[in-house]
Image (spheres, helix red, strand yellow):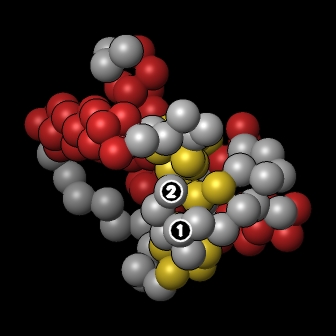
Amino acid sequence: MPKLVSANEISVGMELADPVKNKFGQVLLNSGIKLEQKHKNVLKTWGIDALLIVEESDSLTDRAHQESKIEEAKKILSARMNWHIRNSEEKELYEMALLHILNNHLQ
């Protein structure tokens, strides 16, 4: 099951569940990549604050369940927002709020 993880919490060897894109939509790292130290530096450079990581017990059912939780969190957050993301600072705030909802409201 993919898990949304803060970029500060990632470690070498974790596998990306989804591609990591910058604010322009360009793919920085493809899904399936095992993270190395150099990837952590790329994430920091581009201001990526959270990403989806494959967990060991990944299965299609678990993945669908986690993705539905992420979509539910996005809907909750969208209902609370009166603005659209315009820059990296606002993207960081959005990702922090999304992590908060996933960790505290959708357990």
Find residue 88 and report its horizontal and vertical position in percent.
50, 63
| Direction left: furthest residue | 79
- Disc 1, SS: loop
Query: CA gap, disc 2 to disc 1?
Result: 5 Å
Residue at 16% in and 39% down: 75
Residue at 31% in and 60% down: 85
Proximity of marks 2 and 1: CB atoms separated by less than 8 Å? yes
Side of 93 where 65 appears, left or right: left
- Disc 2, SS: loop
Task: Give the residue type that dot 2 points to.
Answer: Ala
Q: Is residue 85 visible?
A: yes
Find residue 46 and report its horizontal and vertical position in percent.
64, 70
Residue at 30% in and 37% down: 61
Residue position marked by numbered label 1 in the rendering: 31
Of pointers 2 and 1, the one earlier in the residue sequence: 2
Find residue 35 and report its horizontal and vertical position in percent.
75, 61
Task: Give the residue type that dot 1 points to.
Answer: Ser
Q: Quadrant of residue 33?
A: bottom right
Please identify the quadrant where the C terminus is shown. Answer: top left
Tally of marks: 2
Residue position marked by numbered label 2 in the rendering: 17
Up-down: is 80 above or below 35? above
